Image (cartoon, rainbow, N blue to C red):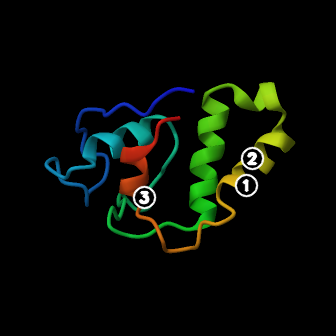
Amino acid sequence: MESLVSSTYKGTFDDVAENFWGTGYIEAAYDMGLINGADGKFRPNDTISREEMCKILYVSLKNAGKLREMGEAQACEQVMLAVSDFEKGNLRLSTILAAMNI
């Protein structure tokens, strides 16, 4: 799968400063369609839900062409397994994006 490579600062989100440690990964994740933000905000210090994590994993699989390989049902099952022990509120999205190697 394609790795998330840090991108240059574009000012996509009003609340992500150019010197924030995760800015490049947040910009790259936005470029790849993994995240959207809301109202021009990303909220980098907020925790994420299972649903948000599922979206990130699902879009990652889709971008990598794995949905066709695995079939959508199996891909969805894999996403659910990957987050089955993920409790809402445990992880910060900016930390996940910096650590992703998909």
Q: Which mark is residue 81?
A: 1
Which residue has dot 2 on it? 78
Residue 68, compared with residue 48, is above or below; it is above
Q: Nearer the viewer, residue 55 or 42?
A: 55
Where is residue 71? Give x, y as percent. 84, 33
Where is residue 1? Give x, y as percent. 57, 27
Label 1 sits on a secondary structure element that is helix
Q: Nearer the viewer, mark 2 or mark 3?
A: 2
| Amino acid type for the residue under numbered disc 3 | Leu
Label 2 sits on a secondary structure element that is helix
Where is residue 59? Give x, y as percent. 62, 41
| Amino acid type for the residue under numbered disc 1 | Leu
**Residue placed farthest to the left in the image?**
19
C-alpha gap between disc 1 and disc 3: 19 Å
Where is residue 20? Give x, y as percent. 19, 52
Q: Is residue 92 left or right of residue 66?
A: left
| Amino acid type for the residue under numbered disc 2 | Gln
Residue at the image position 43 percent from the left and 35 percent from the top: 31
Label 3 sits on a secondary structure element that is helix
Residue 99, compared with residue 7, is above or below; it is below
Q: Is residue 56 left or right of residue 66?
A: left
Which residue has dot 3 on it? 93
Q: Is residue 38 left or right of residue 102?
A: left
| Label pair 1/2, CB-CB below 8 angstroms | yes
